[in-house]
Image: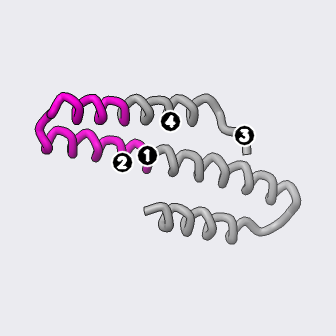
Amino acid sequence: MNYDDNVVRRLKRLEGQIRGVLHMMEEGKNCKDVIAQLSAVRSATDKAMAYIVAMNLEHCILEEQAKGNDTGTLVKEAVELLIKSR
């Protein structure tokens, strides 16, 4: 799979968020604030994973349709992958 610039940007933002959390911890910020930021990191990670799965699914469906094959299994596998990621 080819990962587009959108995926790279998402992951770079996540990297920055993680650095921000570490900085907050080094400064001794309130636990509530650190947890809130970590929650935002988790949410962004979930969205990045969903985006990657969706892009891959789209590519695979188009490929299988061009071959005249059924795509139902691909959708099921993508849903299972998302469920497993949680």
Q: Position of residue 39 (x, y in %)?
A: 28, 47
State how far apart marks 4 and 3 are (Cα): 15 Å
Comes first in the chain, label 4 or label 3? 3
> Quick one: label 4 or label 1, which is nearer the N terminus?
4
Q: Is residue 78 above or below residue 63?
A: below
Residue 54 image point, x, y percent: 59, 50
Q: Which residue is mark 2?
A: 42
From the image, tell me which residue sits under label 1.
45
Residue to which mark 3 is pinned: 2
- Could you tell me residue 27's position as x and y percent? 18, 28
Q: Are marks 2 and 1 in contact (CB under 8 Å)?
A: yes
Nearer to us of marks 3 and 2 is 2
Q: Which residues are magenta?
A: 18-46
| Kind of residue at badge 3 | Asn
Identify the residue shown where x is 21% and y is 40%: 34
Which label belongs to residue 11? 4
SS at circle 4: helix
